[in-house]
């Protein structure tokens, strides 16, 4: 095994800390910030998030292809990672500091533009950064370690975001609190730290010059190659199904904790109970993947995630707050354990599939592949965010008020049963259809070397 130096591995994982912080606040808090603080209608926010993720899914392929085609001496990945910090900073700040003078439709339009801008900007970081992870090592198992460190960094950033979210929720519940001011100050802190992490990463990471300019000039052919790749087609289907099930978990956690568990102050600790095992379990999953196989372990993590959240469906029928909290914490902890496995192994398997594309075409287009897979992820997320917004709107949901049992059943069905069904379906499809393991990967790598 060609082990990547420890310093390079850490440098690769650092931008994920900032990305994890921003993504968590966007996923978990912006919907609640918009409905409960800015007083925007839930259906409007559902439409805004849906449009933003679908647009982001369209922009991802563009970013991936441009990254593949970039020929600057500084690097085709590092160039885009470096310049991304400017639009990311502007977009994130706009989301959390809308002018207090604008209201109504003007505020709706501001949030639409701000959220669209942020997700478009972070694409400039995320797609090249994921692509670079597949390039830093071509070893079947070393890739898992690299993406495992990235997952740890992303989760660490998410845990730091929990601290911020806890402060914001406390500010909401304070009689003289100023949530807008605190949100703006935290946004300034986040963009400063994110910029420093990006600068450090690009100063340490190196790219393989042999991979540059090895992609077809026709962008449509590049993405046609993704679909022609039989292993990529299966991954696309699995990721779409998985993210249909997983999209609602992030956006509804605060709603479930406040309106169903009826213990909103516990929300940050519940999310922490998910995040901590997600990060700490990565060193456990990496050796297990060598023993049992990456794909088999990923199948297990998908099924286990579905079961973990499916059990939460019983919460509205429990009378005691303590009982509801126990079930919520148990589901979060077990789901976090499974997430640590998928977060490390999933991107590693994607890297293996990209190697198969090199075997078929002789090209290196990691950006196009990760962009195409992100397209599927974000389209599925956009669909479920749209559904979630309308379910909240038309089930009778009223912000900051006790909810009827009908509203609670609607929320918990989205939060528990939808993940159970779709994660289980994704696990079955991956197990029964995906047939590209370590032996198959070693065989095609040998043939690539023989050609060279």
Image (cartoon, grey):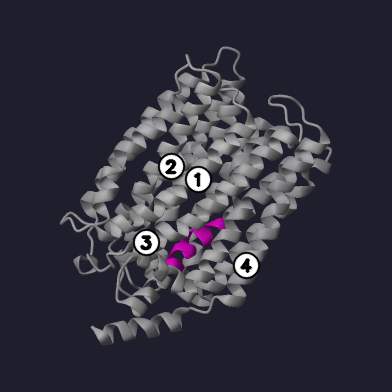
Q: Is residue 351 above or below residue 442?
A: above
Instruction: Determine the residue positioned at 45% across, 47% down.
Output: 56
Alpha carbons under labels 1 and 4: distance apart: 24 Å
Circle 1 sits on which residue?
A: 53
Alpha carbons under labels 1 and 3: distance apart: 18 Å
Instruction: Name the chief secondary structure element in magenta.
Output: helix
Give the structural element (helix, strand or loop) at label 3: helix
Alpha carbons under labels 4 and 2: distance apart: 28 Å
Q: Is residue 243 above or below residue 319?
A: below
Magenta-colored span: 338-350
Circle 4 sits on which residue?
A: 427
Q: Which numbered disc flags the more N-terminal residue, 3 or 4?
A: 3
Instruction: Determine the residue positioned at 22% across, 65% down.
Output: 213
Circle 2 sits on which residue?
A: 119
Alpha carbons under labels 3 and 4: distance apart: 25 Å
Q: Nearer the viewer, residue 279 or 390?
A: 390
Give the structural element (helix, strand or loop) at label 1: helix
Position of the C terminus by quadrant: bottom left
Instruction: Determine the residue positioned at 33% across, 58% down.
Output: 65
Circle 3 sits on which residue?
A: 368
Task: Say if the magenta span includes residue 194.
Answer: no
Q: Left or right? Give the position of 354 relative to 304.
A: left
Residue 133 seen in render: no
């Amino acid at each position: 095994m060609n082990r990547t130096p420890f310093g390079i591995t850490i440098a690769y994982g650092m931008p994920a800390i900032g990305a994890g912080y921003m993504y968590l606040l966007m996923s978990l808090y912006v919907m609640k910030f918009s409905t409960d603080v800015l007083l925007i209608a839930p259906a409007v926010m559902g439409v805004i998030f849906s449009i933003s993720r679908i647009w982001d899914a369209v922009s991802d392929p563009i970013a991936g292809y441009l990254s593949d085609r970039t020929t600057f001496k500084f690097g085709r990945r590092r160039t885009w990672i470096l310049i991304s910090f400017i639009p990311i900073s502007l977009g994130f700040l706009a989301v959390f500091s809308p002018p207090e003078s604008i209201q109504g439709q003007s505020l709706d339009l501001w949030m639409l533009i701000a959220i669209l801008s942020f997700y478009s900007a972070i694409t400039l970081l995320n797609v090249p950064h994921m692509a670079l992870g597949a390039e830093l090592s071509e070893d079947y198992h070393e890739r898992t370690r690299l993406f495992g460190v990235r997952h740890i960094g992303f989760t660490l950033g998410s845990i730091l975001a929990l601290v911020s979210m806890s402060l914001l929720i406390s500010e909401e519940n304070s009689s003289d609190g100023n949530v807008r001011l605190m949100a703006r100050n935290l946004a300034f802190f986040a963009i400063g730290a994110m910029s420093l992490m990006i600068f450090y990463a690009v100063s340490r990471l190196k790219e393989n010059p042999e991979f540059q300019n090895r992609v077809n000039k026709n962008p449509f052919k590049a993405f046609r190659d993704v679909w022609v790749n039989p292993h990529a087609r299966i991954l696309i289907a699995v990721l779409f199904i998985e993210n249909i099930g997983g999209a609602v978990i992030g956006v509804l956690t605060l709603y479930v904790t406040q309106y169903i568990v009826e213990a909103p102050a516990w929300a940050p600790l519940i999310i922490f109970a998910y995040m901590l095992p997600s990060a700490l379990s990565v060193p456990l999953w990496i050796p297990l993947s060598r023993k049992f196989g990456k794909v088999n372990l990923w199948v297990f993590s998908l099924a286990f995630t579905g079961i973990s959240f499916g059990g939460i469906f019983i919460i509205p029928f429990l009378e005691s707050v303590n009982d509801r909290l126990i079930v919520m914490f148990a589901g979060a902890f077990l789901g976090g354990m499974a997430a640590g496995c998928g977060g490390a192994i999933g991107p590693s398997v994607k890297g293996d599939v990209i190697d198969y594309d090199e075997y078929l075409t002789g090209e290196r287009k990691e950006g196009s592949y990760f962009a195409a897979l992100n397209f599927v992820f974000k389209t599925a997320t956009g669909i479920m965010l749209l559904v979630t917004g309308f379910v909240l709107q038309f089930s009778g949901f009223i912000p900051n008020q006790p909810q009827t049992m009908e509203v609670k059943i609607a929320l918990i069905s989205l939060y528990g049963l939808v993940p159970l069904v779709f994660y289980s379906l994704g696990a079955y499809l991956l197990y029964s259809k995906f047939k590209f393991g370590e032996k198959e990967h070693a065989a095609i790598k040998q043939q690539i070397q023989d050609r060279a």
